[in-house]
Image (cartoon, rainbow, N blue to C red):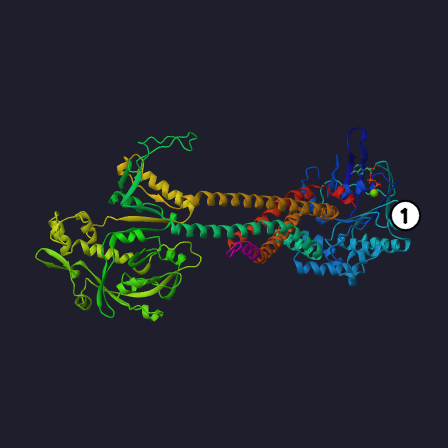
């Protein structure tokens, strides 16, 4: 039971205001076919829209079952439309991309009926209007009469109390009109049908009541119904609802029915993603390349410190000026101002180095003066000595050395060296042969290790060779207060001693082809762990104790120290002095190198020059240029990525906006069927998310495919192999960005679409 009381409604403002309804008072019963007739523009459609809750009245009141609608909120109107009203429009207003069945189902989806029941009910309804066999047809495959019947089926599916029809036969021929009117008359037996028409004949033939309108007021009413007072029954108020999942499903279905458009949209959206993806792939490739380049050059040029360094000071001499133009020439004393600086590798400094963050360097090596002596059995017995501190001078120069220390950092070494045979040393007694890039070992090195010089060797000739590590107590024999190296190599090698374990060659290493510098000598390398073992053992050995007891006499000769010998040198040789002789730090990258230098400078800060640690940075010259190039590349790539991102999001926003414009009428229909603003937002938002997801997957997939030719292209342009690869975490991020961007880009047009006045939306055909 609907009752209108003095309803007024105007459009526009001021001079141009149109009073579409000017005080309409009408009441309707529960059934019957009521026709509203009148000339075009008299306010019929407006009246119908106001009754249907599609449009709001300005003043007056509409009573639904005796209850005022003055306080109705949007949600109440939505529910009212969805549950109590069915709309039939002159132009059918079917959604073209849905088939007949889905068009009918749509308003059921809005009222939250389960999917299976929805389909059954829709088919039942189609049968009633005689169109069951057309269920899978598209609206454009039907005739006008058939389309209007689909619209009627759709309007009836929610079992509304009132069916509102706006010129239902307006676009139909007289024969079809009759069929439709018969159907409506049938329907009017059980519920109220309010029909607008300008065809007075049709109105008279079929209606139980005819209301004539002119200029927004009722002219004549053939059978006014008695307005009943008071509430008869409680308004059935059931909220319309559509879950997000339903919205996602229905938008997915919409996207599926428009495959071509969806694919095109997704491709458009994915272009930006592909752009960013490629930029990220390239930059990860370049980063990899640069990191490798940096590591390689830093492997050759560590930050190094020696116990003594020579520094030239020019400050005291008159330097004149650079590039003088005068015809004058000068003499200078090159030795003036030369200072020998002693780096004090005190425990304090070594501890300080221990505090340097490990993420900044690949390796930090300490070299000690400890004498490493091996006894061997080759063609004959013999002893080979590491030259102690002297080996340091060969470090980084790739020179041969019979024995040298291999630093602890296995991972770092394996970035620069290949294992040609055997396994990488794992214990302190594991040795490694390091051959040069032509697989060669120097003859003098081989000879000094007791290996006969031959034209060719197999790895089996080199691996497994054993050397006895000689500790001081086994090596030095006391003879009247003087300690002399044991000359009997055979007894040294053969006599087993706990302090002097056997060491064995475990592998053959060769510098990698890609390495820029070989930082290990070639020859036989022993692990740093062995040095530490000898340092421990050296402190308590008889020879070092004897030297400590008499600091003036060289225990190795029994005579005073000479120009070339000293107490300190001896103690270092015996391993009794664990002050490093030199320290090398291999930073991970140029940035890290700067951090390491800052760290070292912090140690020196505030100290007198003589107490400072002087270091040399051989990689300095390459640093400046390379890191500049790297920075330029980084800036260029990230700006390209940023531009792609903006282009991509603008593109997506435009696509969604166009899609909203394109479907304005559909939005109106959905609103007329009782969809809430929220539902409209949801449908478009979920459509945007779906497109974003598809675009993201497409973009990431295409990026991975394009990475292959791009990698090959860059590789062919540059020397070496370039690996353009999108890191998986970035791929995931791009997918998220794509979904997020389409969501953000889509949410505003969606909100706009939801805000659209259903009446205006419907008018936009
Ligand atoms: P009918 O359906 O009887 O032809 P309408 O109800 O569509 O008439 O229109 C009544 C009057 O209100 C007309 O003058 C029409 O131009 C005007 N009108 C209807 N809707 C709007 C609107 N959205 N904006 C401005 N004027 C409108
Ligand atoms: Mg009209």
The span picked out in magenta is 711-726
Above or below residue 30? Residue 520 is below
**Is residue 235 something one can see in this rendering?**
no
Helix, strand, or loop for circle 1? Answer: helix
Task: Left or right? Give the position of 323 relative to 753.
Answer: left
Q: Decide which of 397, 8 is in the foreground and name it.
A: 397
Task: Left or right? Give the position of 88 relative to 410.
Answer: right
Rendering quadrant holding ligand 2: top right
Q: Picture coordinates of residue 198 (x, y %)?
A: 88, 44
Q: Residue furthest front?
A: 327
Q: Decide which of 701, 714 is in the foreground and name it.
A: 714
Q: Residues within 10 Å of mark 1 (few under 14, many from 20)?
A: few
Query: Is the residue indicated by label 1 positioned so its CB lies within 8 Å of ligand 1?
Result: no
- The quadrant in which residue 355 appears is top left
Q: Decide which of 48, 667 is in the foreground and name it.
A: 667
Quadrant the N terminus occupies: top right
Q: Decide which of 643, 420 is in the foreground and name it.
A: 420
Residue linked to disc 1: 204
Q: Picture coordinates of residue 338 (x, y %)?
A: 29, 38
Q: Is residue 740 magenta?
A: no
Q: Is residue 719 magenta?
A: yes
* Residue drawn at 54 percent across, 45 percent down: 638
- The quadrant in which residue 710 appears is bottom right
Above or below residue 215? Residue 354 is below
Q: Picture coordinates of residue 433 (x, y %)?
A: 33, 63
Above or below residue 8? Residue 199 is below
**Is residue 96 something one can see in this rendering?**
yes
- The quadrant in which residue 714 appears is bottom right
Q: Residue furthest left?
A: 480
Q: Picture coordinates of residue 699 (x, y %)?
A: 60, 54
Instruction: Count the marks.
Output: 1
Task: Left or right? Give the position of 364 relative to 113.
Answer: left
């Amino acid at each position: 039971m609907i009752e209108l009381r003095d309803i007024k409604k105007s459009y526009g403002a001021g001079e141009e205001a149109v009073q579409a309804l000017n005080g309409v008072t009408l009441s309707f019963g529960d059934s019957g076919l009521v026709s509203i007739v009148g000339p075009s523009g008299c306010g019929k459609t407006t009246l119908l829209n106001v009754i249907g809750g599609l449009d709001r009245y300005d003043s007056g009141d509409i009573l639904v079952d005796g209850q005022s609608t003055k306080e109705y909120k949007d949600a109440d109107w939505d529910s009212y439309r969805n549950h109590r009203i069915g709309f039939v429009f002159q132009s059918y207003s079917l959604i073209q991309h849905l088939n007949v069945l889905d068009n009918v189902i749509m308003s059921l989806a809005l009222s939250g009926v389960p999917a299976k029941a929805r389909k059954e009910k829709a088919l039942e309804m189609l049968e009633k209007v005689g169109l069951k066999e057309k269920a899978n047809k598209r609206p454009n495959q039907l005739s006008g009469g058939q389309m209007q019947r689909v619209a009627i089926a759709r309007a009836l599916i929610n079992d509304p109390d009132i069916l509102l029809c706006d010129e239902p036969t307006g676009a139909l021929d007289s024969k079809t009109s009759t069929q439709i009117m018969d159907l409506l008359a049938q329907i009017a037996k059980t519920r109220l049908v309010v029909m607008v028409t300008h065809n007075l004949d049709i109105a008279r033939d079929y209606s139980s009541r005819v209301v004539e309108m002119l200029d927004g007021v009722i002219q004549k009413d053939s059978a006014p119904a008695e307005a009943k007072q008071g509430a008869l029954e409680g308004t059935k108020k059931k909220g319309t609802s559509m879950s997000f999942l339903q919205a996602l499903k229905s938008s997915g279905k919409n996207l599926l029915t428009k495959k071509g458009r969806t694919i095109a949209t997704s491709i458009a959206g994915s272009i930006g993603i592909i752009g960013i993806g490629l930029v990220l792939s390239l930059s990860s490739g370049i980063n990899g390349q640069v990191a490798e380049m940096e590591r390689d050059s830093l492997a050759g040029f560590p930050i190094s410190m020696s116990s003594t360094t020579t520094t030239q000071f020019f400050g005291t001499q008159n330097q004149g000026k650079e590039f003088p133009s005068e015809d004058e020439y000068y003499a200078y004393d090159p030795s003036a101002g030369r200072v020998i600086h002693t780096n004090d590798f005190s425990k304090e400094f070594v501890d300080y180095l221990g505090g340097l963050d490990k993420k900044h360097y690949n390796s930090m090596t300490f070299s000690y003066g400890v004498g490493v002596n091996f006894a061997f059995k080759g063609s004959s017995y013999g002893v080979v000595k590491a030259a102690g501190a002297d080996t340091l001078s060969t470090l980084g120069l790739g020179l041969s050395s019979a024995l040298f220390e291999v630093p602890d950092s296995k991972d770092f070494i394996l970035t620069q060296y290949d294992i040609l045979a055997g396994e990488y040393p794992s214990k302190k007694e594991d040795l490694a042969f390091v051959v040069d890039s032509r697989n060669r070992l120097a003859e003098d090195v081989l000879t000094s290790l007791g290996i006969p010089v031959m034209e060719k060797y197999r790895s089996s000739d080199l691996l497994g060779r054993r050397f006895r590590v000689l500790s001081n107590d086994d090596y030095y024999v006391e003879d009247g207060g003087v300690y002399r190296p044991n000359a009997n190599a055979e007894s040294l090698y053969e006599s087993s001693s706990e302090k002097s374990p056997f060491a064995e060659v475990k592998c053959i290493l060769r510098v990698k082809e890609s390495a820029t510098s070989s930082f290990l000598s070639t020859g036989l390398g022993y692990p740093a762990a062995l040095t530490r073992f000898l340092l421990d053992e050296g402190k308590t050995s008889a020879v070092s104790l004897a030297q400590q007891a008499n600091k003036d006499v060289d225990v190795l000769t029994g005579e005073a120290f000479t120009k070339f010998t000293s107490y300190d040198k001896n103690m270092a040789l015996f391993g009794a002095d664990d002050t490093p002789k030199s320290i090398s730090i291999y930073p991970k990258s140029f940035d890290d190198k700067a951090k390491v230098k800052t760290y070292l400078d912090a140690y020196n800060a505030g100290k007198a020059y003589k107490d400072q640690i002087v270091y040399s940075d051989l990689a300095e010259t390459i640093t400046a240029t390379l890191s500049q190039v790297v920075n330029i590349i980084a800036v260029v790539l990230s700006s390209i990525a940023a531009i792609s991102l903006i282009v991509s999001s603008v593109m997506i926003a435009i696509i969604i906006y166009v899609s909203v414009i394109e479907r304005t009428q559909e939005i109106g229909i959905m609103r007329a069927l009782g969809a809430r603003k929220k539902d409209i937002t949801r449908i478009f938002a979920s459509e945007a998310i779906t497109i974003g997801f598809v675009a993201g997957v497409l973009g990431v997939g295409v990026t991975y495919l394009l990475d292959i030719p791009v990698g090959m292209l860059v590789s062919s342009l540059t020397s070496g192999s370039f690996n353009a690869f999108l890191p998986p975490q970035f791929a995931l991020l791009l997918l998220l960005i794509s979904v997020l961007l389409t969501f953000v880009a889509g949410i505003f047009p969606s909100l706009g679409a939801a805000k659209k006045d259903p009446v205006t939306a419907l008018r936009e055909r």
